[in-house]
Amino acid sequence: MHRPAPAVVSVTDLVVGHGTPLGPPLSFDLAAGEVLAVVGANGSGKSTLLRTVAGLLPPLAGQVRVLGAPLDARSRSFRAAVATDLGDDAFLPGLTVREHLLLVASGHAVPDPVAVCERLLAEFGLTDRADAPPTAVSSGQRRRLLMAAAFARPRALLLLDEPEQRLDPGMRRAVTARLRAERDGGGAVLVATHDGDLVRGCATSALVLAEDDVRSCAPEQAAAAIEAL
Ligand SMILES: Nc1ncnc2c1ncn2[C@@H]1O[C@H](COP(=O)(O)OP(=O)(O)OP(=O)(O)O)[C@@H](O)[C@H]1O
């Protein structure tokens, strides 16, 4: 008998917050080949939601399941399946941009990690700065490195918090195209963003967070909601 694959992420009656609830309970499913954009004003809870789904914050109520299992960020299966760029930059002293990428790819047993990393360095415009430590590149270049690192490893789910931050317009368009390719290749993406063009360019659905309200809508409506903020 054919059983449908479980949602990559399944959220039921989830209440997030730092001690006190932020907004009403949330429920949504995210399947392979989908990009769910989370939009809303500053402080509406986008990062808090992403950090909860990443297992960095405990839910105040409700459930998050990842690939059919209750969220357990310490489990090997969760760590193997979930790639994140939540904007936290922590780097190892003494390692270059290239070496950071290689560390991620090798740590996840990616075949031919050197070739994978060189491709990502070129794609994210970092080849010229690959031998510098991350502390010696620009803030936008560090952001490119964090994003490249998320793509340097296998993943079923990608969690991104405002990937457009600090990127120039050309790289924003490139990231949007990258997320479209992720979606079309069967990946699942949960992305918080203030970038209407990114939502239009890659999302399959959206959640609009507001005080005491959460609305599920089509990408075009979410992009319009961003532009109305
Ligand atoms: N570490 C923290 N401790 C306590 N409260 C926090 C913490 N981080 C965020 N908050 C609060 O939680 C609420 C939601 O913040 P969150 O960062 O999730 O919003 P956001 O929608 O991602 O905002 P932005 O668009 O500015 O990134 C805000 O009121 C914020 O002040």
Image (tube, rainbow, N blue to C red):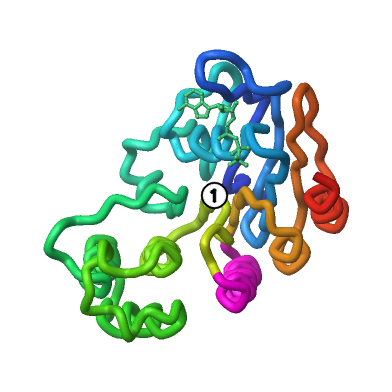
> In the picture, which quadrant includes the C terminus?
top right
Is 130 located above or below residue 48 in the figure?
A: below
Point 52% across, 61% down: residue = 166
Residue 38 in the image: state x and y as whole percent.
68, 45
Looking at the image, residue 60 sits to the left or right of residue 56; the answer is: right
Looking at the image, residue 5 sits to the left or right of residue 114; the answer is: right
Dot 1 corresponds to which residue? Answer: 161
Looking at the image, residue 81 sits to the left or right of residue 188; the answer is: left
Say if the magenta span includes residue 185: yes
Is 199 located above or below residue 206 in the figure?
A: below
Find numbered disc 1 in the image and state the secondary structure of the residue it sits on.
strand
Whether residue 133 appears in this view of the structure is yes
Total marks drawn?
1
Point 29% across, 76% down: residue = 111
Looking at the image, residue 226 sits to the left or right of residue 148; the answer is: right
Q: Is mark 1 within 8 Å of ligand 1?
A: yes
Identified by mark 1, the residue type is: Asp
- 98 or 152: nearer the eye? 98
- 147 or 181: nearer the eye? 147
Whether residue 185 appears in this view of the structure is no
* Residues drawn in magenta: 168-187
Say if the magenta span includes residue 199: no
- 209 or 80: nearer the eye? 209
Quadrant position of residue 176? bottom right
Point 76% across, 48% down: residue = 206
Prevailing secondary structure class for the magenta stretch in the rendered image? helix
Quadrant for ligand 1? top right
Residue 163 in the image: state x and y as whole percent.
55, 58
Disc 1 residue crowd, few under 14, some 14–19, many 20+, Cα 10 Å: many
